[in-house]
């Protein structure tokens, strides 16, 4: 009989299997196998108790059947899901799905997928932590309660298809509030007075006629120019020289939020892209020692580092960079977060000798870039601080004082690994009292600027600082807001759509707690207390639900519908009913009041008036200018001759030319080209819409032996097959090659 280890990911299962002998079988659940039903509320509320109606996830039936069969034959069944609340809950649900008592199954945990870590975990099993499971259940039920009760209300009062959520709405309010600040911002004009002295000394005025000059002190051009005239007549000399040393502290190793922020600013990765690459690095990639996980678990809010990893880093620093770069004692970091799970570790490399230079032989693209970022940050965190010398020179006269500053890197410390964009700005050596000639003095006009829009990195930083959400929720929250069309990302900035303002206004007026960051953070703390066995999860749910449900009932009565249809005085050209002006998430439009019987929508007015921006391109069909418009998938070009000419053109730059296949369309004989849609790439006839042939897989010059239809290449159960587009008959390529031989 074999021992059975159950994990979530097939990649993780494969990596662990490599470390173990024949007496172990490793299988993946492929994520959650039980969850609340997708198409109904799924929670029974009896008195003050909440009973979740968990179901086997659609598509997981075969996996559950396979795990059950292996479990019946297994000597020992180990639950080896990730060591966080989500992983604990997955283990709990796996136990129930295979008809086992969760308390009886040994639970093994590890922060990294290496041979030593797996061996140690098997030697020190524990039981499933029901407090962590209940914290996850409380979170899941809270999200379901808010989503299923509030989203339909918002949709019914504003417009169809809208949603609200416990974390997503708090995050959206932050974004909307920032945009409100930007829109209401009134710039203030101010002036600075800057001078150039001999020896190319640049300085700024800090004092005039005995008064200190603050940022907004000089608000008028006339005053600034008068001051310049006075200063130009003065004689100047060195009145003060100051030298200071300043240390730049080493950065701590990464946790989830800081990894996402750094990957965004340094590599240009979205949070979801960062987590996908990190997942691969954690679960197992090829190295010089075989397949293994090369970073520790990537969903963490801890800055703890294992002693063995610290010592390995210190040995590497001493060997490569020398004693100067090695602190006397290992550096220890602590997080400010109250909820940080200190039993976890920060994100670090598992093999210190698997350097970025060596990794380049095994890893490629995003994975190599992210691994290098993690490796260098970890090594830098155990090095000595960098040190600068700061120079300050004061140049004075009877009327004013100018200040010049310089800096010099005197010890690079951790910059040796991470590099630095700080350039030395050295000042010449002077003596106090030395006279300097003023070569130029001028007043520069400035305007105060509005606060910057959030980037994906800065919104994550803010969510973390406010205690909204947890490491596993940052990336999904941003992705969800974008997929719901509440926000769009433009030049790395998050821009809220108009519908976001409407939703937040309603929530602010009637559901304050849903958009209140303090309330959301407090609720997160309560979930932490459930995990620590300090609070009862059912009571936390009831305390929230009782007040929330009452507000839902009031909202149905008191929230005024914004689904206003304003008559335009025009008649529908199709059915004769009156046309009305409506609002959608993409803006205003005019349509027939007889909807849904009549689905007429009036073509929009000329984009030249609507957008006010004409492009340089000309329509290839009618010769009229093309204009920019915005649709649900972003900006595109449309002919200004619409509706007579309906030609459109994407503004998205294609990374590669469209692939044209050698085979011809079976319907019309035209070319078959590769196209893309929101659901991914597909192959279709170039004569569309006259010919509607499409295929989700790449057609090939081969006919089906059964029906004579066109065959296409695809992957089936990790094997290349040729499948008929018409009858779906498939042949495995390897098997056919063997037959031909």
Image (cartoon, rainbow, N blue to C red):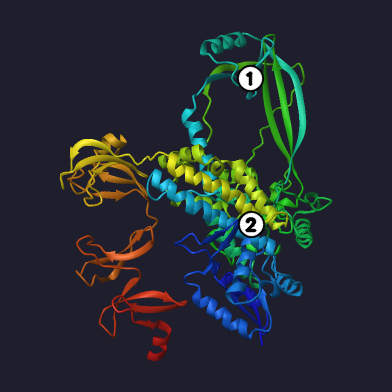
Q: In this view, does 124 lie above or below 365?
A: below
Nearer to me, 132 or 268: 132
Q: In this view, does 448 lie above or below 311?
A: above
| Picture mark count | 2
Q: Residue furthest front?
A: 47
User: In the rendered image, is residue 106 in sight?
Assistant: no
Dot 1, how many residues are within 10 Å of its Cα: few (below 14), some (14-19), or many (20+)?
A: few
Q: Is residue 691 left or right of residue 584?
A: left
Q: Residue furthest right?
A: 328
CB atoms at circles 1 and 2 under 8 Å apart?
no
Nearer to me, 436 or 279: 279
Pinpoint residue 12: horizontal percent, then vertical percent.
60, 71
Residue for point 58% across, 12% down: 228
Q: Is residue 94 above or below residue 189?
A: below
Residue for point 50% across, 77% down: 62
Select label 1 or label 2 by which is in front.
2
User: In the rendered image, is residue 227 in sight?
Assistant: yes
Q: Is residue 664 left or right of residue 412?
A: left
Q: In this view, does 255 lie to the left or right of 315?
A: left
Residue 214: image tag: 1
Disc 1 to disc 2, how far (Cα)? 56 Å
Pinpoint residue 379: horizontal percent, then vertical percent.
71, 55
Pinpoint residue 341: horizontal percent, then vertical percent.
71, 55
Toward which corner of the image does residue 702 lie, by quadrant?
Answer: bottom left
* Mark toward the start of the polypeptide (1 vs 2): 1
Residue 556: image tag: none
Dot 2, how many residues are within 10 Å of its Cα: few (below 14), some (14-19), or many (20+)?
A: some
Residue 538: image tag: 2
């Amino acid at each position: 009989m074999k021992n059975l280890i159950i994990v979530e990911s097939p990649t993780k299962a494969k990596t662990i299997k490599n470390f173990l002998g024949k007496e172990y079988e490793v299988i993946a659940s492929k994520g959650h196998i039980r969850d609340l039903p997708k198409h109904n509320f799924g929670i029974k509320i009896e008195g003050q108790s909440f009973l979740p109606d968990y179901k086997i996830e659609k598509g997981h039936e075969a996996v559950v059947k396979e795990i059950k069969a292996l479990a019946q034959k297994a000597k020992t069944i180990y639950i080896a899901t990730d060591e966080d609340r989500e992983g604990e809950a997955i283990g709990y649900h796996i136990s129930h799905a295979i008809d086992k008592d969760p308390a009886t199954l040994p639970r093994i945990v590890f922060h990294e997928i290496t041979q030593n870590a797996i061996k140690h975990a098997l030697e020190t099993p524990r039981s499933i932590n029901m407090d962590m499971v209940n914290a996850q259940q409380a979170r899941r039920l809270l999200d379901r309660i808010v989503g299923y009760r509030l989203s339909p209300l918002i949709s019914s009062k504003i417009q169809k298809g809208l949603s609200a959520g416990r974390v997503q709405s708090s995050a959206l309010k932050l974004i909307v509030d920032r945009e409100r600040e930007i829109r209401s911002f009134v710039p203030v004009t101010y002036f600075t007075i800057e001078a150039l002295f001999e020896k190319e000394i640049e300085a700024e005025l800090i004092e005039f006629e005995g008064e200190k000059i603050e940022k907004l002190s000089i608000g008028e051009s006339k005053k600034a120019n008068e001051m310049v005239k006075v200063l130009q007549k003065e004689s100047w000399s060195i009145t003060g020289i100051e030298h200071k040393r300043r240390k730049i502290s080493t950065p701590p190793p990464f946790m989830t939020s800081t990894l996402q922020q750094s990957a965004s600013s340094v590599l240009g990765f979205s949070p979801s892209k960062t987590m996908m690459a990190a997942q691969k690095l954690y679960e197992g990639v090829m190295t010089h020692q075989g397949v293994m996980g090369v970073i520790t678990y990537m969903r963490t809010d801890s800055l703890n580092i294992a002693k063995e990893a610290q010592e390995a880093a210190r040995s590497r620093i001493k060997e490569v960079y020398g004693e100067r770069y090695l602190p006397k004692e290992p550096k220890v970091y602590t997080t400010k977060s109250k909820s940080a799970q200190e039993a976890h570790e920060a994100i670090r490399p598992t093999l210190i000798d698997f350097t970025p230079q060596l990794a380049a032989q095994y890893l490629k693209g995003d994975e190599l870039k992210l691994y290098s970022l993690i490796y260098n940050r970890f090594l830098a965190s155990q090095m000595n601080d960098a040190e600068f010398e700061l120079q300050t020179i004061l140049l004075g006269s009877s009327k004013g004082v100018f200040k010049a500053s310089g800096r010099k890197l005197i010890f690079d410390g951790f910059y040796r690994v991470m590099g630095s964009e700080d350039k030395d700005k050295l000042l010449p050596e002077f003596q106090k009292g030395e006279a300097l000639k003023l070569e130029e003095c001028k007043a520069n006009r400035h305007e105060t600027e509005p606060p910057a829009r959030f980037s994906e990195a800065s919104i994550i930083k803010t969510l973390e600082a406010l205690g909204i959400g947890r490491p596993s929720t940052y990336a999904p929250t941003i992705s969800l807001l974008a997929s719901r069309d509440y926000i769009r990302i433009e030049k790395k900035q998050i821009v809220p759509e108009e519908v976001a303002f409407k939703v937040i206004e309603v929530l602010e007026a009637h559901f304050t707690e849903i958009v209140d960051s303090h309330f959301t953070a407090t609720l997160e703390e309560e979930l932490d207390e459930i995990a620590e066995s300090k609070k009862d999860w059912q009571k936390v749910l009831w305390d929230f639900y009782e007040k929330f449900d009452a507000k839902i009932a009031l909202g149905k009565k008191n929230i005024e519908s914004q689904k206003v249809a304003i008559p335009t005085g025009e008649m529908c050209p199709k059915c004769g009913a009156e046309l009305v002006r409506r609002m959608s998430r993409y803006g205003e439009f005019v349509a027939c009041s007889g909807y849904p019987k009549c689905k007429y929508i009036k073509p929009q007015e000329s984009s030249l008036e609507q957008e006010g921006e004409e492009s340089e391109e000309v329509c290839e069909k009618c010769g009229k200018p093309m204009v920019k418009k915005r649709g649900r998938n972003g900006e595109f070009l449309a002919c200004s001759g619409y509706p007579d000419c309906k030609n459109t053109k994407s503004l998205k730059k294609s990374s590669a030319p469209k692939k044209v296949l050698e085979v011809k369309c079976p319907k019309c004989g035209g070319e078959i080209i590769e196209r893309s849609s929101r659901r991914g790439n597909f192959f279709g006839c170039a004569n569309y819409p006259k010919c509607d042939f499409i295929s989700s897989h790449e057609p090939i010059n081969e006919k089906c032996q059964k029906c004579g239809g066109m065959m296409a290449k695809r992957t089936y159960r990790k094997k290349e097959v040729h499948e008929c587009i018409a009858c779906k008959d498939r042949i495995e390529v390897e098997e056919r090659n063997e037959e031909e031989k």
